[in-house]
Each structure stands twice: as structure tokens, then as C-alpha cells.
Image (cartoon, rainbow, N blue to C red):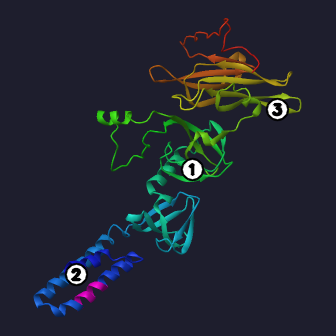
Amino acid sequence: MHRLMLTQLTHYQGHTCLARRQAAIFVGIRAMQKFTGFLPTHKNARLAALIFAAAGLCLLAGCGKGGLSDRAEYAYVAVTEAGLRDHVATFYNKTGVVHNGERVQILERMQSKRFLRVRSPRGEEGWVQERYLADQQTFDEFQRLAEHFKTAPAQATATTEEQVKVHVLPGRKTGYLYLLNEKTKVDLLQRQAVDRNAPPLQLKDEKKEADENPDEDKVKSDSAGPPAVREDWWLVRDAQMRVGWVLGRALYLVIPDEIAQYSEGQRIVAAYQLDEVQDGDKKVPEYLVLFTEKEGQPYDFSQARVFTWNARKHRYETAYRERGLAGVLPVTLGRQNFEKEGTLRTFVLRTKEDDGSVRERTYKFNPPLVHRVLAPGEEPPAPRHRKGGKSSSKGKSKP
């Protein structure tokens, strides 16, 4: 009988933690009053002590794992909207609605069914599925990304082709919070290729740091999985200055059709306006455009082309092309004084070397010509030739 009473005390469920604590004490007192009349005096004292000890544990533990602790806990809505219900069952009453990005306070957990009882910013309370929410660690990482990349220069601009999830780390199985609606314009900041079949990346936990050097058995087990399928993810920034990772296939690069038609089967990675020229009553921009063969490469781009505008023939022409690059973003635009030539526009490409280091290459743009700027003591690069002996990196040609 004593054990039954303790079970009732520790598993009693109420709507709030306070109510649960009060109910535990009330049940204990009533139980003591009911049963003490049938027990010897020395057992009455033992029973009373046992009941109040159980009630005290309930008070100190915050009603156990299934309830609310004294420390406020929060989560963030990661779906477009989610309805709150008065209880977890097939039939229920709707008590409120929470929307994407809103912070809710966690009041109670139902571990067996993955439901949480929460309070919305408007004071509405109800149960919601745990999978609809992002935890505090995920939110904090989004805040860190936003702060770190708030002034980072955009490498390109893109729009979303449909509603997409913004992930905290690159990868389909990583945590997400924000949603971008269709036709939302975003800045592209960084690219990263991720194996879609690999285990998802994890945020570093200060309490449980992941082992950066996994043992051989783990490496072997990972290598026995499905073949790698690498896809591009982009770190993006929206108009609200929120920063996160989006699958590259869900983004449509914003670039003039006059340039896009000269991709020649290559994927355009980014485009930068270098200058603009007057053609009649309009000004036409001139571009540096980066290309790659396909997604999932260990580098960001493999080819760079400069398109200048021929005002006499009213068309774009290739002023410069360089292939075979293992280029990485970002690209830096600037100006530099070259004495006799005056101040010219410049751009810096970063390329991976065989030893894994990144080397900067500076170029000057004196329309319509582009030339490499060599650092002191740097040897000029060996010319690349096409079949037939024509150079592929310099000279002006049609696109």
C-alpha cells in the first residue's frame, strides 16, 4: 500500500507544475489522514515521514522528467505555423497558433509521444509536436552567423524558386529554423559541397566536444556506406539580415540574360560588375563571371571570363578568359594606381595550390583589356594554348 501511494504521488499529472506540486501534497495529507487510523502509532510516524519525503522530492525535482523545471526553457517555431492543442489525443480543441521564428516557452514534456506543452508570445498555451520546434542551441548558432556575416560582401544574388528551409549547417538532415518564401531575394556569401549520403554535420556542444580524429574502426564503417553524392549548399543572407545554409538547387542566380546565354554548358557561380559603358542613351555594365563544370566540386569555380560591351556592334565580347582554375570564394574588387595607366579597377581571384594553400592572383582591368598583375619577384605564368597554338587566356573574341 505504501508503494502504491508513492507511485501515485510521483506520477500524478496536472496541467501545470505548480498544480502538480500542490496536488502531491494534498494527496499525501489526505492519504495520511485516511490510513493513520488503521496503523499503530510508531508506523503512523514512519508513514507520515515517507509521504512528506516523496512530496518534498517532487518539489525539488520540478515534477520529474515529464514536467517543468524551475529554469525557463525556450524553443523556436521551425514551420510556417503550428496549432496548439488542449491535450494530446485524436480529438482535441485548438488553443492557439504559433508562427515561424516565434519563441515559445516550454512548460511540460511528454517524452513518450514527443509532444511539448508550450506558451506562445501571446500567452496561449497548448501541446505541439516537438519536431516543429528548433532548440536554443540552433537559435544561438543562427544569431552567431548573422553577427559574423552581417557585413560580408555578397558574391552573387539569387532568388528562391519555392519555399525553402534555412539550415544551421549545410546538409539536408541538419537542423533548421527559418523559412524563405518563393521568389525571396538573398545574397550568396559562401559555398560548401556536402555528401548527401553522409551522416549530418553536428553543432559543437560545449559539454560534449566531438572527437576530431575518429578511430580507424569508425572510418572503416563510414566508408562502407553508400557512394558519395556531393551537392552544393550556399550560405545566404536575406533582407532581414538572417543568415543560414540553403540547398543550391533551390536557388536561381540573378544574372542578365545577355550573359547567361554564353555559359556554354557551364554552371555560372557568380558575376561581378566591373564597369559600365555608354551606348547611345543607355549604360551597359561589363562583368567578371565565374563558371564551374558541375556542382559538388572541391573548388568554387574553374573558369573566369570578363565580358566587355562593344558599343559599335552592340554586343558582349570576351575580353579575357582563364581556364583550369581551382578557385575559391570570395572574389575581391578594388582600385589601384598604375602610374602611367592611372587608377584602374582590379579584381583578386583566390586559387588552391597543389599543397592545399590558397594563393591570390590580382588582375587589372583597363577596358577592354585585362592583364595579370605580378607580385615582386613573381614569374609570369606559362601560356595556355588551344589546339592550333592560339592562346586561351588573352585577347578579345566573340562570346
Q: Is 144 drawn above or below residue 286 in the view shown?
A: below
Q: Earlier in the sequence, mark 2 or mark 1?
A: 2
Q: Amino acid at mark 3?
A: Lys
Q: Residues within 10 Å of mark 1 (few under 14, many from 20)?
A: many
Residue at label 1? Answer: 165
Please tell me whether mark 3 sits on a helix, a strand or a loop: strand
* Residue 241 image offset from top left, x and y in percent: 60, 49
* Residue 274 image offset from top left, x and y in percent: 71, 29
* Residue 6 image offset from top left, x and y in percent: 24, 78
Q: Amino acid at mark 1?
A: Lys
Residue at label 2? Answer: 51
Whether the residues at callouts 2 and 1 have beta carbons within 8 Å, the answer is no
Please tell me whether mark 1 sits on a helix, a strand or a loop: strand
Highlighted magenta segment, given as a residue range: 26-33
Magenta span includes 281? no
* Residue 41 image offset from top left, x and y in percent: 12, 91
Is there any visible trace of residue 133 in the rendered image? no
Residue occupying the point 85% across, 33% down: 282
